[in-house]
Amino acid sequence: MKEIILVKYGEMALKGLNKKTFEDMLTKNIKRRIKPLGRFVCTSAQSTLYIEPQDEDTDLNEVVDRVSKIFGIAALCRACVCEKDFGDICEKSYEYLSDVLGCARTFKVNAKRADKAFPMKSPEICMELGAKLLEKFPGLTVDVKEPEVTVTVEIRDTNAYIHAENLKGAGGLPVGSSGKALLLLSGGIDSPVAGWMMAKRGVHIAAIHYVSPPYTSDRAQLKVEQLCEKLTDWCGGIAFYCVPFTEIQEAIKDNCPEEFFTIIMRRLMMEIAQRIAEKDNCLALITGESVGQVASQTMAAIACTDAVCRIPVFRPCIGMDKTEIIDIARKIDTFDISTLPYEDCCTVFTPRHPKVRPQLGDIEKAQNSFDFGPLIAKAVENTEMKTFNFEG
Ligand code: ATP
Ligand code: MG
């Protein structure tokens, strides 16, 4: 029996004239993602993409697992390929569905006849195949309202397909279809989730991380690289920029009032991020901030940070509770990495009493008392870039 994977498009099926571009992007993302698993032919018709393995021993579970993490997909399923012949459809259903139907109590048949030349109409297929399956699996009864199993028969151009599972896809839009943005990625719980949420909306992610050796260790950077690698499952390739931040942090400490340390540091992080964003064609910045979580995330503090930003800053976690963010972090498997012990550059010079309602004028005055320009230029100059891709 030959099995394939059927992929149903998500929201992009609605995109009218741009549909073709979205479709091509999704197909490209899928091909790239499953290439290490063998040879496949991918074709699309009627808002469905067909992934046909060309090798006998392809691990379809692994293919399904990978494809279920690709954004732009509403649903996917494994399906059995049949001749466009009712006899063959029945025979293959007995065999292909024997496990599920053998232990189910209720079922229904759902037929989709894309090929109108097929001699039986959809209701007829449902009735006839339903009757055959009832005969074959005596424990079953039909329940059209809430069946345990829905057997779907699709009559398409070249073949018919049967399946009884429908897995939820990752939703969203194909990564890359919304352009690129630069994620400020710390080793914490929130920023990987923020990156994932924007990738879901079709944004291609690049990441930037600030390190302050010797106050922060190599291990801390490695942890962030691990997060990047994990995110590639969903986000595709990620360019990772690592910024040496020690001198800037020391300059803040030596020249600015302690209560403003964090805000000024965040403003300088944004400044550097924008310069990298510009070089790498990123149209926005992304952070993991959430209102009120810490002193630097009050509305007044965010306003002071935003005042240096010339491009949009997306904060998809802004209205979420920590528990909601953690739920996503667990789902995308970044939580265990994020909670490894680690010292962040933010915690190195944390003020004892940070200003929760900073005034922009005061912050600007404090920051302007020292010329950070040359240090910013040097940090950008010495930023190192690495690329992360799906592991084989
Ligand atoms: P996270 O869990 O993402 O670390 P957080 O709640 O710890 O967030 P902060 O430490 O105030 O909050 O950082 C706020 C945001 O600033 C982070 O979500 C991240 O986007 C960015 N950020 C903080 N530290 C760094 C860093 N060392 N490198 C890159 N970005 C950082
Ligand atoms: Mg943090």
Image (spheres, helix red, strand yellow):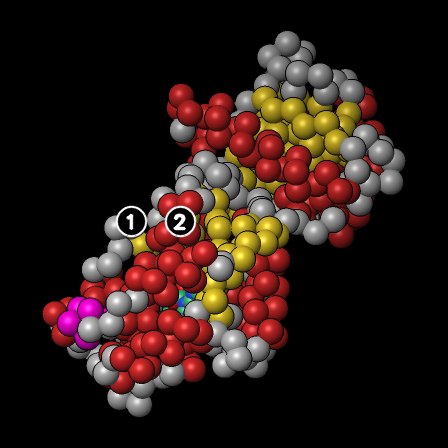
Disc 2 crowd, CA 10 A, few/some/many (<14, 14-19, 20+): many
* Stretch in magenta: 364-368
Position of the N terminus by quadrant? top right
Q: Is any atom of residue 288 visible in this view? A: no
Residue nearest the observer in this picture, 126 or 154: 154
Q: Disc 2 versus disc 1: distance between alpha carbons?
A: 9 Å
What mark, if any, has residue 277 been given in the picture? 2
Residue nearest the observer in this picture, 192 or 43: 192
Magenta-colored segment: predominant secondary structure: helix
Q: Secondary structure at mark 1?
A: loop
Measuring from the top left, give residue 242's x and y in whole percent: 51, 61
Indicate the amino acid at tag 1.
Ile
Contact, mark 2 vs mark 1 (Cβ under 8 Å): yes
Determine which quarter of the picture holds residue 248: bottom left
Indicate the amino acid at tag 2.
Ala
Determine which quarter of the picture holds residue 270: bottom left
Determine which quarter of the picture holds residue 144: top right
Residue nearest the observer in this picture, 21 or 375: 375
Measuring from the top left, give residue 92's x and y in whole percent: 81, 31
**Residue at the spot 55% in from the left edge and 54% down from the top edge:** 385
Measuring from the top left, give residue 332's x and y in whole percent: 56, 60
Disc 1 crowd, CA 10 A, few/some/many (<14, 14-19, 20+): some
Residue nearest the observer in this picture, 162 or 386: 386
Q: Is mark 1 within 8 Å of ligand 1?
A: no
- The residue that disc 1 covers is 311
Q: Is residue 126 left or right of residue 304?
A: right
